[in-house]
Amino acid sequence: MAVLHRLANALHGYREGQRARAAATTLLAGSALVYLAPLVLTYGPFFDRYLLLPAIALAALALQGPCPVTRRAWRTAAVACGALLATSAVATHDYLAWNRARWVAIERLQTRYGATRAEIDGGFEFNYPNGPDSGLLDDAEVATRRYRVAFGLLPGYRRLESVAVASWSPFESRALLLLVRGEDAARPPSGMNNPG
């Protein structure tokens, strides 16, 4: 909101003859908005590092000098900051809840179904405990894993059970699935007797 306010003042400055200041403001605010627009309009992973470049432009814009701010602008800024705070808290909670559920799911595969570490595709952190330098697996190798932890059913796999994810967001998945390859689903877990 403050960026748009500054941009409007800069455009007004062109008419008032303050060309140099208005040009700098237009360049800084415009570049920040142009950089952020595709990130805001597209759906995909968004990382805080994407904000570093526009943060520099916005900091330079803020250091240009005083800009009259009304009570309405303060209220709008407070509401925007509150919404950002709430969204960040929900997103962080949901990420940690999902990650906690993933490790519970992996532990269940190992204890209830006798799965070994080499048989489980549990995601990047589980598959590469020593980081990517320990040797990345290609997709074909990961696809040969007998067990997988996923948000939904995958082709060639069958559901064993699910682990609840205590997410706050209505847009997040509420469960992780423990999957086993189709031909292995009929077999009892290793170390367990067939009750039939």
Image: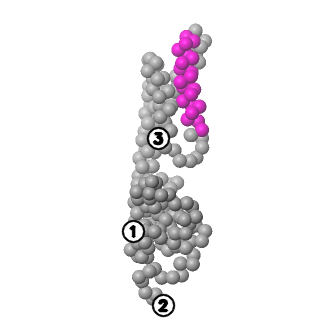
Q: Which amino acid type corresponds to the residue marked 3 in the rendered image?
A: Asp
Q: Give the residue number, with chain letter if any, for mark 3.
A: 48
In the rendered image, the vertical position of residue 83 relative to residue 187, given as above or below: above
**Quick one: 143 or 24, which is closer to the camera?**
143
Q: Main secondary structure of the magenta part?
A: helix
Compared with residue 174, is residue 21 higher up or lower down, i.e. above or below? above
- Badge 1 is on which residue? 107
Q: Give the percent coordinates (x, y) of residue 92.
A: 42, 49
| Residue 42 to residue 27: above or below | below
Q: CA distance from mark 3 to mark 1?
A: 31 Å
Number of marks present in the image shown: 3
Is 175 or 111 nearer to us in this picture?
111
**Quadrant in which residue 126 is drawn:** bottom left
Badge 3: residue crowd in 10 Å (few <14, some 14–19, many ≥20): few
Mark closer to the chain start, 3 or 2: 3
Question: Who's the residue at 47% across and 34% down the image?
Answer: 52
Using the numbered discs, state the Cα–Cα distance from disc 2 to disc 1 in whole angstroms.
Answer: 26 Å
